[in-house]
Image: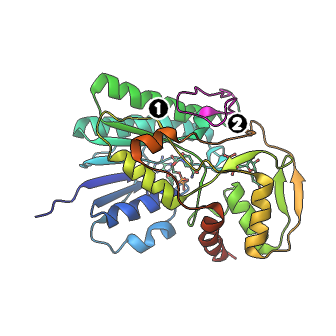
Amino acid sequence: MHLRKRVMVTGGAGFLGSHLCERLLKDDNEVLCVDNFFTGSERNIIHLLDQPYFEVMRHDITFPMYVEVDEIYNLACPASPIHYQNDPVQTTKVNVHGSINALGLAKRLQAKVFQASTSEVYGNPVIHPQPENYQGNVNPIGMRACYDEGKRCAETLFFDYYRQHNLKIKVARIFNTYGPRMHPNDGRVVSNFILQALRGEPITIYGDGAQTRSFCYVDDLIEGVIRLMNTPDDVVGPVNLGNPDEFTIRELAELAIALTGSTSELIFEPLPQDDPQRRCPDITLAKDLLGWEPNVPLKEGLLPTIEFFRTFL
Ligand code: NAD
Ligand code: UDP
């Protein structure tokens, strides 16, 4: 008889988590989605609820969990500045206490554990593109610190559990990812621009719009995550996962207008504190280790994303 792996996804009702749960179910795993629905939503996983090997547990991972699983993907953490700055102390807690709980569980179960880290560990980088051995430029007392330093501390914990307890760990540094099920009100650039374009409202460019970001379509990202999890035990990361195609924020605004056929105008607003000027992954390591690189061009990935946002009008 085929024995399914039991896989836990913390933050499984969120944007990335719900796509990951879907993929893991498709790959014939049993999935336990653990989420406190802080930024996640039942809407994201409603289509999975009638699947026999899918289970949802409402739980805050800053408190210990007692479950039996074979693998853990730790994604729980609000990802957008609006959400993580809403309760910065809880953001640090979810990264530190939450990671300790996920790691403690993995240690008891001898389970492999994946950490969704972030390009934000590089802070406002002075090296472009950022390779994994770049140690970052983070303001420890700024508005983003609860997230950036929280994620940095989570990486520290993962690597100390690896060295001290021989835990099987996989750490990915995820760069900006977009796609259906992104939060409509999270203030992120992709959701803001698409909704503004669809509503015919002005497109709000912060600063002069010359700052760049690289945008990875969610299906590409999930493929990278699964590949990393399935590497041999000596591959632990951190591994950058993201799309190296760089676009200025102004270019993104123009693309959003063109693809929605909008008549919106561009308006310019002040740049938020600590807003990085450039961010672009060096994915050499992911290419070498995982044979992975993104396949979906921005124009193509924006189309299903726009369709998703239409449902909110
Ligand atoms: P998201 O906000 O949609 O998902 C986070 C999920 O975690 C939500 O479902 C939320 O309810 C849940 N959660 C938050 N606190 C929790 C807690 N204490 N206990 C249990 N569940 C909790 O964000 P996302 O974009 O899906 O991000 C998922 C992970 O990937 C996060 O760890 C984020 O830092 C990381 N990441 C995302 C991106 C991106 O571009 N989306 C980039 C880099 C890193
Ligand atoms: N941004 C913008 N207009 C918006 C929202 C964001 O110009 O309505 C800019 C923001 O200042 C930043 C970039 O877009 O330079 C990406 O912002 P986002 O919050 O999406 O992600 P992050 O800064 O975490 O990469």
Residue 70 seen from this side: yes
State the CA–CA distance, disc 1 to disc 2: 20 Å
Q: Image quadrant of residue 309? A: bottom right
**Residues in magenta, as a range:** 122-141
Q: Nearer the viewer, residue 156 or 172?
A: 172
> Residue 72 appears at what percent x and percent y?
34, 47
Name the residue located 87 percent from the left edge and 47 percent from the top edge.
Answer: 208
Please rate how many residues cluster around mark 2, counting C-alpha atoms within 10 Å: few if below 14, some from 14 to 19, many from 20.
Answer: some
Q: Is residue 217 above or below residue 286?
A: below
Q: Which mark is residue 155?
A: 1
> Residue 253 appears at what percent x and percent y?
78, 60
Give SS at disc 1.
helix
Name the residue located 74 percent from the left edge and 66 percent from the top edge.
Answer: 256
Q: Nearer the viewer, residue 62 or 203?
A: 203
Image label count: 2
Mark 1 residue's CB less than 8 Å from ligand 1:
no
Please rate how many residues cluster around mark 1, counting C-alpha atoms within 10 Å: few if below 14, some from 14 to 19, many from 20.
Answer: many
> Residue 19 appears at what percent x and percent y?
46, 62
Looking at the figure, which quarter contains the N terminus? bottom left
User: Which residue is under mark 2?
Assistant: 143
Q: Amino acid at mark 1?
A: Glu
Of label 1 and label 2, which has the lower sequence position?
2
Q: Is residue 136 magenta?
A: yes
Asked if residue 49 lies left or right of residue 87, the reply is left
Give SS at disc 2.
loop
Q: Amino acid at mark 2?
A: Met
